[in-house]
Amino acid sequence: MKNPKKTKRSKARKTTAYLTKRDLVRVASAAVKKASDASMEIAGYVVKAENGWIVRENSDGSVIQLEKLKDYSKSRKLVLD
């Protein structure tokens, strides 16, 4: 009688003692979204960096480009020490 072929299963999620990049991105993204929504509700607009520009996004959905960023590069990465 043949043994059934074992398949690789994904490892069960385990708790780690360190902060992973995935965890950091998930938590930071949620915090920024929450702060942005609160800011939009209070002031009626949010100023942010988007696609190499500083833009003002109004509560009606309109976007105004305020200033082009200097030395903008999509390949630049954030390094946390």
Image (tube, grey):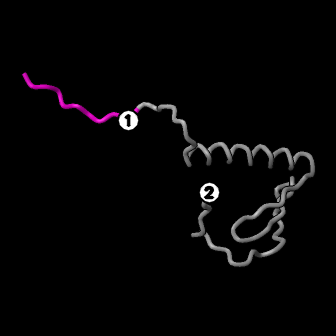
Furthest toward the bottom, the residue is: 71
Neighbor class of circle 1 (other Cα within 10 Å; few <14, some 14-19, many 20+) is few
Toward the left, the furthest residue is: 1
Q: Which residues are magenta?
A: 1-11
Question: 29 or 19: nearer the eye?
Answer: 19
Residue 74 figure quarter: bottom right
- Residue 3 position by quadrant: top left
Indicate the amino acid at tag 2. Answer: Leu
Q: Is residue 65 left or right of residue 25?
A: right
The residue singled out by tag 2 in the image is 80
Percent across and percent down for residue 40 are 86, 49
Whether tag 2 and tag 1 are in contact, CB under 8 A, the answer is no
Distance between the alpha carbons at the discs numbered 2 and 1: 29 Å
Residue 72 is situated, as x and y percent measured from the top left of the image, at 67, 74
Q: Residue 7 lies in magenta, yes or no? A: yes
Callout 1 secondary element: loop
Residue type for callout 1:
Ser
**Residue located 85% across and 44% down the image:** 38
Look at 81% across and 63% down and name the residue there.
63
- As displayed, is residue 26 above or below residue 4? below
In the image, residue 32 above or below residue 57: above
Find residue 27 and report its horizontal and vertical position in percent.
Answer: 66, 42
Residue 54 vs 39, above or below: the answer is below
| Side of 30 relative to 21 (left or right) | right
| Helix, strand or loop under label 2 | loop
Q: Which residue is mark 1?
A: 10
Q: Is residue 41 left or right of residue 9?
A: right
- Left or right of 58 in this view: 4: left
Where on the picture, by quarter, is residue 47?
Answer: bottom right
